[in-house]
Image (spheres, rainbow, N blue to C red):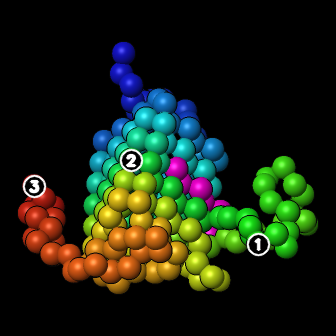
């Protein structure tokens, strides 16, 4: 028995679209599949949760126990991105200040919900337990080549080819760009 959905089973999920060589664990939970687009060479492991408007590029891996909570603005994951185990990306979040009620069982008129676009550009790598939350009124963009250390909190956009660590995260050093040459070689085959 295969633990990943077959092509026929992927069609039955009702995804907006999906490419070739897509491996999604049968233990993954998907809500609103008609809002989710998946490229080629994508793997989504056990116990992941995907909900809302999500677009996933090519050569993307989402490791076990990760969750993507996209609102109407969406989560966009570009090519060659890796999301390690237990990462959480929040495109939509309640206001926790106490000025409003929170949680989805409360009518929306009593809540203040932030719904922001989250974009992970090419070659982004999230270390285990990284959390991304919507910024103060702005979309969050993890620029090309951004990498985060384990247990980092991202609450604002990042600079390209930088490594971030901490709560909240800060740049700790630059990241090498050798993978750009490897990408070119891979695309030739």
Q: Residue 189 carries which label?
A: 3
How crowded pointer 1 is (Cα within 10 Å; few <14, some 14-19, many 20+) is rated as: few
Identify the residue under disc 1: 97
Image spot of residue 91 (x, y percent): 59, 65
Task: Name the residue: 28% across, 74% down.
Answer: 163
| Magenta span of residues | 67-74
Identify the residue under disc 2: 85
Find out whether residue 69 is within the magenta segment: yes
Of pointers 3 and 2, the one earlier in the residue sequence: 2
How crowded pointer 2 is (Cα within 10 Å; few <14, some 14-19, many 20+) is rated as: many
Q: Which mark is residue 75?
A: none
Name the residue nearer the viewer: 169 or 144. Answer: 169
Image spot of residue 85 (x, y percent): 38, 47
Find out whether residue 93 is within the magenta segment: no
In the rendered image, the residue lying farthest to the top is: 1
- Label 2 sits on a secondary structure element that is loop
- Label 3 sits on a secondary structure element that is loop
Name the residue nearer the viewer: 98 or 17. Answer: 98
Image spot of residue 34 (x, y percent): 61, 49
Name the residue nearer the viewer: 137 or 31. Answer: 137
């Amino acid at each position: 028995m295969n633990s990943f959905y077959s092509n026929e089973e992927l069609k039955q999920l009702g995804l907006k679209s999906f490419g070739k060589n897509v491996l999604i664990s049968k233990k993954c939970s998907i809500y609103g599949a008609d809002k989710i687009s998946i490229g080629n060479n994508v793997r989504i492991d056990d116990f992941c949760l995907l909900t809302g408007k999500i677009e996933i590029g090519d050569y993307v891996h989402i490791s076990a126990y990760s969750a993507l909570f996209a609102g109407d603005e969406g989560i966009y994951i570009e090519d060659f991105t890796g999301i390690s185990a237990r990462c959480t990306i929040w495109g939509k979040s309640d206001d926790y200040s106490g000025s409003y009620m929170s949680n989805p069982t409360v009518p929306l008129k009593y809540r203040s919900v932030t719904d922001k676009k989250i974009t992970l550009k090419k070659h982004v790598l999230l270390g285990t337990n990284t959390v991304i939350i919507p910024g103060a009124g702005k979309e969050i963009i993890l620029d090309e080549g951004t990498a985060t250390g384990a247990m980092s909190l991202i609450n604002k956009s990042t600079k390209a080819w930088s490594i971030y660590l901490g709560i909240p995260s800060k740049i700790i050093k630059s990241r090498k760009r050798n993978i750009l040459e490897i990408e070119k070689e891979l695309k030739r085959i």
